[in-house]
Image: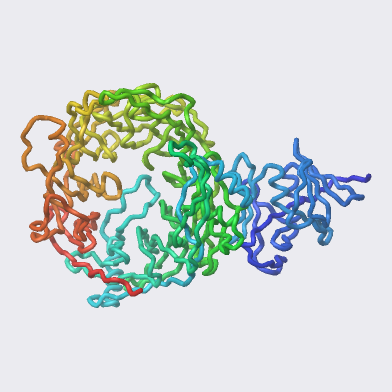
Amino acid sequence: MQKRTLFAGLLALTLLTSVFPAPVSLGADTGPAIALTLNGQPVSLSVQPRLIGNTLMVPLRELSEALGAKVQWDEAERSATATKAERSIKLRLDSKEAFRGSEAVTLDEAPALDNGNILVPLRFFSESFDFNVYWDGANKRVTIVDADKSLPTVGSRERMEALLKESASVHGSGSGMIFLSGNATAVTEKSSTAAPQAAGSAAKQTSDAAPSYSGTNVQVQGVDEADVIKTDGTYIYQVNRDRVLVTKAYPSESMSVVSTVYWADPNFYPQELYVDNNYLVVVGNTSYPTYEKPGPIPYDASPAVSAEPGIGEAKKMVIWPGRPTRSTTKTIVYELGDRTQLKQVREAELEGHYISSRKIGDSLYVITNKSMNYFWFLRQEADSTVKQANESLPAYRDSAAGNQFITIGYEDIRYFPKAVEPNYLLIGGLKLSKPDQKMQVTSYLGSGQNVYASPDNLYVTVSEYEPVKENGQTVQADGKTIIRPAPLDMTSAIYKFGMDNGTVRYVGRGKVPGHALNQFSMDEHNGYFRIATTSGDMWRNDEHTSKNNVYVLNESLSIVGKLEGLAPGERIYSVRYAGNRAYMVTFKNTDPLFVLDLSKPQAPAMLGKLKIPGYSDYLHPYDENHLIGFGKEAVEVANKKGDGSDTVAFYQGMKLALFDVSDVANPKELFKETIGDRGTESPLLHNHKALLFSKEKSLLAFPVTVAEMKDKTGANTQENASKYGDFTFQGAYVYGLDLQKGFQLRGKITHLTGDDMNKAGQHWYGSERNIERLLYIGDTLYSSSPDMLKANDLKTLREVGSLQLPAWKPRNP
C-alpha cells in the first residue's frame, strides 16, 4: 500500500441552511472572500473556498501545518488519515462515510477533488482535533480557536436537548416563532414653535463657544453607559414615554422642543440612549406577533413524592404556551445634523430582552438575553407537524446586511459549561462610523447576570450551583424545630470577551466562590481583574453562614490572590474600587465599611473597618482619600420574633455619608445627612446614573421621594421602628459638599404643583411630574420629568426657565 504525506490542509466549514438559505457558488469572482483566523491570527488562503451544498470546502496547506496534524495519503483507497497525538480521522474521496478514531461518522458532504486540491469539511476536521469553529455569516468570517481558549459549541439539536436535560435549571417562557419584518424608519415631527433654519443656525453659533456640561455618571472613565437623558451642551435628548424628545435647552430662557422622534414600528419602546458629536443612538425593545396559534403540548409529569394515591404515578398533562412573540432589542442610529429632522442611518436588532450596553468611542456593544420555551422546543422534536423548526434558535437583524433576520445555527451557538439554561446570551458589536461594517453577533446558551466593561474587555458573570454534600440544618424558632435545607454551593463563572472596534472575541473563563452583587462588584486594574462576592446563606449560623470575599485574577482569569471570610452572617450591599484600594459595605444590623488593600495582587489585605448604623447601597469617590455613601439609616431594636437573634435592624430614611479614608486603618464618618424617615426612596439607591456630582462645582444632586413621620415620639421598639412615614415631597435635593462643612442643603426643586400636593395622601406614585434626572449646562441646572424640563440657576437655584413637554398621545395602531 503506497502512502505519502499530504502537505495540503484538508479543512472546511459546515454552514447551516438558516445562514445560507440556498446553495451559492463562492468562486473568487462571486463576492467578498471569506476571512479565516486561527487563534486570532489571519490565515491567507492560496485557493478560494468552494461551497458544496451548504458545506464550505477549503484546501489550506498553511493551516494544516499550523494545526499540527500529520496527514497520510493512501493511493489505493483514495483516503487520507490525519493524526495528532491520540486523535485520528480518516476520510475518503467522494464518500460521506468518515471515521473519528474507530467511530463511523456521516459527513454532510463528501471530500472532493477540485483542480488538484482535496477539499473536506472544515468543522469536522477542526473539531476532531479539539478546535472550535465559529461562523459569522453577515461578515463572512470563519474563526478557529483552540478548545481550551474558547467555548464549546452546541453542534446539533440532539446535543442541545441533551444539554438542557442535564441542566438542573430547566425553565423558560414562550418566545417568538413567526415574525413580521419591515423597514422601521423613523418619523420625526417638527415642533410648531421651532424655526428650522434658526435652530440650526443657533446650534452652530453656540457650539463655537459651548459651555461645559455634565455627562452620565458612569463606572469606568472612557466607557459610556446609556441613560434616559443626555446632553451635548446645547440640546437635551430625552427618552419620554414611547418617543424621544430633542430640546434646544441652551440658553435656558428660550427652551423649545425642536423635534419629537417616533417610529414606524408601533411596538418599539425606547429605553435608553447615547449621544456623541455625530450620533444619537436609541436602544429599546420591540416584538413581532405570530400569526399561527400553537396547539397544546402533551407533557409527561412524574412527581417524585406524593401523599395522595395515584399522584406519584406518571400522568399526562397538557401545557398551553399561549400566543408567542419574537421579542428583540432594537438599536436605531441617527446622524446628528439638523436636529429638527434627524436622519436614520442604521438599525440593528438582537433577539431577547435588553440586559445592558456599553459605548467606547464610536464602538457600540449591546447585550441581550433570549429565553427559550423549553416545552415548545421538546414538542418540535416530537411533532413533525410543527412548522417553526427554528423557533428555539436565536436570530438578529442588521440593516447593513439586509432587512431579513439571520438565524444563528446550532453549530455556531456556544455554551457555558455547568451553567446551561434555556436562555441565550447574545452580544452584538458595531462600529458607528462604519455603517457598511456589518454587526458582529455571538450567541451563548446560558444567561448572564452582571456585566462589567473596561475600555478593552467585557466581563459577564454567570451563577453556577452545586449542592453541598450534607444534611439540612436543624434550628429552633418560636419554640418549634425547623429543618432548613442543605445549602447550595454557589460559584460565579466569569467570562471575558475582548472588545476591539465593534468586534467581540471570547478570551477566557474563570471561577470564584460566591455571587457578585452588581457591576460595581467587578473591576479591572493594571491587567488584573478583581471581584467581590458573597458566599453562603445569611440565615445559617454554622460554617455555611454568609461570608464576603475579594478575589484577584490574572489576565487568564486564574485566581492569584484572595481575601475571604469578611463579616460572617452579613452580605455585600455595595463595593467601589479606586486604584489599589477597594471599599466594601456589608450589612445585617450595622454597617461595616471595609478598606481593602489590593496593591499586592497576590496578597489582598484588610486595612481597616468602620461600624456605624445603616448601610450604603452606592459608593462614589469624592477624591483619593474620601468617599460618599448613599443608602439608608437603620435602627437596631430588640427582636420579638423569637428566631434566635437578639436584635433586628429596620431601615429608616435615606442616608448620605462622607467617609475619610486617609488613615486607612481607621476610616471615619466625617459627615452624615439623613433625609426623611422610613419610606423615603431614591432612584439613586438602585441606579447610579441618577446621581449628578461635580467636585469642582461643589454640587451633589439627585431625585428623591420623601416620607416623614408626623409623630416621632415613643420608645425605640420594633413596632415604632417598622412604621412608615407619610409622603411630603418628590423632586430633587441639591447639596453643596466640601471637606470643611460637609453636606449643605442648598435647596429643593420639584415639578409638582400645589394642587398635586393637596391631592396627595399618605403615599405617592409614579407621577409624570416626578423628577427622574438632573444635569447641568454651564451655570444652569436642569431637572427632567416626563412632563417638564425646568432650569434653575446653579448658584442660587432661582428658577430661570421651564418647558412643558408635549403631551403624550396614543400612537395610531
Report the coloring of the rendering: rainbow
Residue 692, how many percent across, how many down? 25, 49
Where 332 sits versus 496, above or below?
below
Q: Residue at x 33, y 75 (%)?
A: 812
Across the whole image, how many numbered discs are drawn on residues? 0
The reply to whether residue 456 is in sight is no
Say which quadrant the C terminus sits in: bottom left
Toward the front, the furthest residue is 309
In the figure, residue 151 lies in which quadrant? top right
Where 389 sits versus 123, above or below?
below
Q: Residue at x 48, y 69 (%)?
A: 291
- Residue 742 lies left or right of residue 276; in this view the side is left
Where 809 sits versus 736, above or below?
below
Of 504 and 493, which appears nearest the observer? 493
Say which quadrant the N terminus sits in: top right
The reply to whether residue 227 is in sight is yes
Toward the right, the furthest residue is 1
Q: Residue at x 59, y 58 (%)?
A: 383
- Residue 525 lies left or right of residue 766; in this view the side is right
In the figure, residue 618 lies in which quadrant? top left
Residue 434, how many percent across, how many down? 50, 63
Residue 730, how many percent across, how many down? 16, 52
Of 716 and 330, which appears nearest the observer? 716
Residue 13, how many percent across, how many down? 69, 55
Of 103 and 737, which appears nearest the observer? 103
Q: Residue at x 44, y 47 (%)?
A: 455
Where 179 sits versus 119, above or below?
below
Of 164 and 564, which appears nearest the observer? 164
